[in-house]
Image (tube, grey):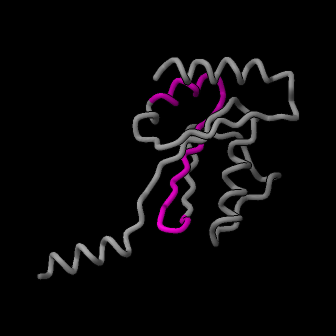
Amino acid sequence: MFSLFYGLWKYIFTKTEFHVLILGIDKAGKTTLLEKLKSVYSNVEGLPPDRIVPTVGLNIGRIEVSNSKLVFWDLGGQPGLRSIWEKYYEEAHAVVFVIDAACPSRFEDSKTALGKKGSSE
């Protein structure tokens, strides 16, 4: 009988967790996007843009929306860090690829990085 109530309790109150990768070349605005998402969708105040530094490795953000938990993995975009991106693909449910529209001179770099990401799957 306990397992029936436990199962019902878990079904009603447990939130499904989804992992979302935030990728893009360096200085594209990945961490800024993550901090804005945190400040809009959670009770956590995101960092102001002037306090955001380049990501070396990984930043993690958590947001609860409806019956779901979203865990964002913001990975560094410097050329030397892009090789670690593929280590996260298998566990990711979604990928957000960020491109800085205000910097057209870097579109080709973004296209190349996105192409390498797509070809490694």
Position of 86 with respect to 54 (left or right) is: left
53 horizontally vs 59: left or right: right
Whether the magenta-drawn stretch holds residue 13 is answered as: no
Q: Nearer the viewer, residue 110 or 65?
A: 65
Q: Is residue 70 magenta?
A: yes
**Residue at figure coordinates x 69%, y 29% from the top left:** 25
Nearer to me, 88 or 78:
88
Q: Tell me what residue is drawn at x 51 percent, y 54 percent.
A: 71
Q: At which x and y percent is residue 57?
A: 56, 38
Q: Is residue 1 above or below residue 112?
A: below
Please tell me which residue is depicted at 75% across the width and 41% down the height of the picture: 29
Q: Residue furthest left?
A: 1
Task: Provide the residue span drawn in magenta.
Answer: 64-86
Give the percent coordinates (x, y) of residue 118: 55, 22
Report x, y in % for residue 12.
36, 75
> Is the residue 70 above or below the residue 111 in the image?
below
Residue 4 drawn above or below residue 99: below
Quadrant of residue 108 in the image? top right
The one nearer the camera, 5 or 111, is 5
- Residue drawn at (70%, 40%) of the image: 54
